[in-house]
């Protein structure tokens, strides 16, 4: 076992995005690419001497190899201990929990989340801080700065650590603890939720279908939903994590989880369906014949969380990302809760959760979570839904109908244009910025613009400022459209167009969102000129 210093030089394009660094897997596999970024993480956090880190990933192609590299670099640089999931697996929420309960100095998660996996697809690496949450911008800025100054990294040369066997081992002077990836997480879920009530619901014939999309939540969902809560074998489908996720996008939305949608809209549909993403932090909820938009799911959970034991005391406050619909704001207003609006990405919720200002957080992209960890958490959201349904005995559709009747409805949809030319996308955004002063008062497709600006955020806890977080166009009457460029894509640019309109007419609560939003969609096109500027006739994905 020899410790060596490898000479390297900065590699372009290692700037962390919305959630860590994501690139094509073959880029990560180029000489020094992974090592440079890992070294930059170590440098950005002030070195790893004497520290304890958590390590795990979503099992995608290259996960196992990357884990060995990270272990060898940590060992070479004086890290005291790495706690790693068996076979280098850990869902993102389970990694967050592990960082917290073991009070480590943070952790490294190997995942590109909802991006597809495989040699030709995507890989990613991100650092989470000791609170269990994604590194905030000051940390990612330091990491990025280190990628631009790197000249060498230390690593030891040795054979692979056996990650198959649970227990303690070592690498040089560093101890390595291989842990069951599921056990601690499952115990946490059992503390938060009334497992007996959910088990009784299921024993009474309530049928569930959980689609793990060949990604990391398979083992977690099988252990919890089938083994502990008694759902029959086969309730969790696509349960074995595959390095390429079976060739699909592990993105829980009606397009990529179409099988689940078909099953839930069939004649013999189960009562409750759900899916999760590559790294297990997102969720899609579907009832029999009833798709729940993530923004509505957040609002329903906020209104009913007190029915689960872990939240019986009520919520300190709620938070949502800016593009997420205002459905949860209505609940907060009705219940007298503080409501925060943050930029996209879970890292912005961390301070609010740490400060005890928010209990529940959510994003329109199918992420919901609470202060139990510092990441969004797919299976947690599923269990909270099940706990609520077990207590009030309603169907998913009934939950939605009752919710809209009480609070009103925010019709909502997101249209994504993927892999568009980056310069064209930037041009589209800039052209709108140039019109901020003149848009208000003008009408498009019958909608009059009330406001136009770009969202920026001042963190109420630490005062940090984040600019350029999405263009917002508000219309008279409460509708709005938001334009953002994705920070998780790896090819060209992805334009996200978030569309929303408010409805308080009790007779108009059950429309198709695309119809209900037709004017807003037309106004967005008229203002941004998406077709002309991107050459696209229609979005690739509508959620
Ligand atoms: C997307 C989502 C955002 C989410 C992020 C990471 O980011 O819009 O809400 O936090 O992915 O989620 P962007 O920049 O592509 O819009 V995950 O589950 O992919 O880590
Ligand atoms: Co994810």
Image (cartoon, helix red, strand yellow):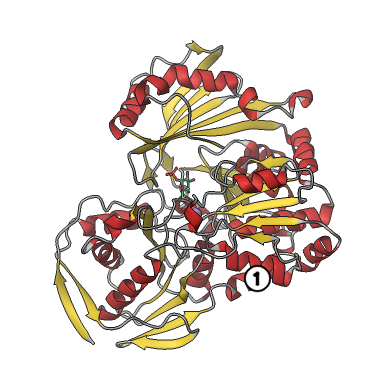
Label 1: which residue?
223
Give the image location of residue 457, x and y in percent.
Answer: 43, 41
Residue drawn at x 41%, y 68% as measured from the top left: 107
The picture quadrant where one finds residue 48 is bottom left
Residue drawn at x 67%, y 68% as measured from the top left: 224
Give the image location of residue 340, x and y in percent.
Answer: 55, 44
Label count reads 1
On the picture, is 315 further left or further right than 3?
A: right
Q: Is mark 1 within 8 Å of ligand 2?
A: no
Give the image location of residue 415, x and y in percent.
Answer: 50, 32
**Which quarter of the rendering shows the N terminus?**
bottom left
On the picture, is 76 further left or further right than 341?
A: left
**Which quarter of the rendering shows the C terminus?**
top right
Residue 387 drawn above or below residue 254: below
Residue 424 drawn above or below residue 369: above
Is 480 or 30 nearer to us in this picture?
A: 30
Is 158 or 513 nearer to us in this picture?
A: 158
- Is disc 1 placed on a helix, strand or loop? helix
Is 160 or 21 nearer to us in this picture?
A: 160
Is 141 or 484 nearer to us in this picture?
A: 484
Residue 164 drawn above or below residue 25: below
Inspect this view and state whether residue 351 appears.
no
Residue lying at the far right in this picture: please name it. 204
Inspect this view and state whether residue 230 appears.
yes
Residue drawn at x 69%, y 32% as measured from the top left: 409
Residue 125 drawn above or below residue 185: above
């Amino acid at each position: 076992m020899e410790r060596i210093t490898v000479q390297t030089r900065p590699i372009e394009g290692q700037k962390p995005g919305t959630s860590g660094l994501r690139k094509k897997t073959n880029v990560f596999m180029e000489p020094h690419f992974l090592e440079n970024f890992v070294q930059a993480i170590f440098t950005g956090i002030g070195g790893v001497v004497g520290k304890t880190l958590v390590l795990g990933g979503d099992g995608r192609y290259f996960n196992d190899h990357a884990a060995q590299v990270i272990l060898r670099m940590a060992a070479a640089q004086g890290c005291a201990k790495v706690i790693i999931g068996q076979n280098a697996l850990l869902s993102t929420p389970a990694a967050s929990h592990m960082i917290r309960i073991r009070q480590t100095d943070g952790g490294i998660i190997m995942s590109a989340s909802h991006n597809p996996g495989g040699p030709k697809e995507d890989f990613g690496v991100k650092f989470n801080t000791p609170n269990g949450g994604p590194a905030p911008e000051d940390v990612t800025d330091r990491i990025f700065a280190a990628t631009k100054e790197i000249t060498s990294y230390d690593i030891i040369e040795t054979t692979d650590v056996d990650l198959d066997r649970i227990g303690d081992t070592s690498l040089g002077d560093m101890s390595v603890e291989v842990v069951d990836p599921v056990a601690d997480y499952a115990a946490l879920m059992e503390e938060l939720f009334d497992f007996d009530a959910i088990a009784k619901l299921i024993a009474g014939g309530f049928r569930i279908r959980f689609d793990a999309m060949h990604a990391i939540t398979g083992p977690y969902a099988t252990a919890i939903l089938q083994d502990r809560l008694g759902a029959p074998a086969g309730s969790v489908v696509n349960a074995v994590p595959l390095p390429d996720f079976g060739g699909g996008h592990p993105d829980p939305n009606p397009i990529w989880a179409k099988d689940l949608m078909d099953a839930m809209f069939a004649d013999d549909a189960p009562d409750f369906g759900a899916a999760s993403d590559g790294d297990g932090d997102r969720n899609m909820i579907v009832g029999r014949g009833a798709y729940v938009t993530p923004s509505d799911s957040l609002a329903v959970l906020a209104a009913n969380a007190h029915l689960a034991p872990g939240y019986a005391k009520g919520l300190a406050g709620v938070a949502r990302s800016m593009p997420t619909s205002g459905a949860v704001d209505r609940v907060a207003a009705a219940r007298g809760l503080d409501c925060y609006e943050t930029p996209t990405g879970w890292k912005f919720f961390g301070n609010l959760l740490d400060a005890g200002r928010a209990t529940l957080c959510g994003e329109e992209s199918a992420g919901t979570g609470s202060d139990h960890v510092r990441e969004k958490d797919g299976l947690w959201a599923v269990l909270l839904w099940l706990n609520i349904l077990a207590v009030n005995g309603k169907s998913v559709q009934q939950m939605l109908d009752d919710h809209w009747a009480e609070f009103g409805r925010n019709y909502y949809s997101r249209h994504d244009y993927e892999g568009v030319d980056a310069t064209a996308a930037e041009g589209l955004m800039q052209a709108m910025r140039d019109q901020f002063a003149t848009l208000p008062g003008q009408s498009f497709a019958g909608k009059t613009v009330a406001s136009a600006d770009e969202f920026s955020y001042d963190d109420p806890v630490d005062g940090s400022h984040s600019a350029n977080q999405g263009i917002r166009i508000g219309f008279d009457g409460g509708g709005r459209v938001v334009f953002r460029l994705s920070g998780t894509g790896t090819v060209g640019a992805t334009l996200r167009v978030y569309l929303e309109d408010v409805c308080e007419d009790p007779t108009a609560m059950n429309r198709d969102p695309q119809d209900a939003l037709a004017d807003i969609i037309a106004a967005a096109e008229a203002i941004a000129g998406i077709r002309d500027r991107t050459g696209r006739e229609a979005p690739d994905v509508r959620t």
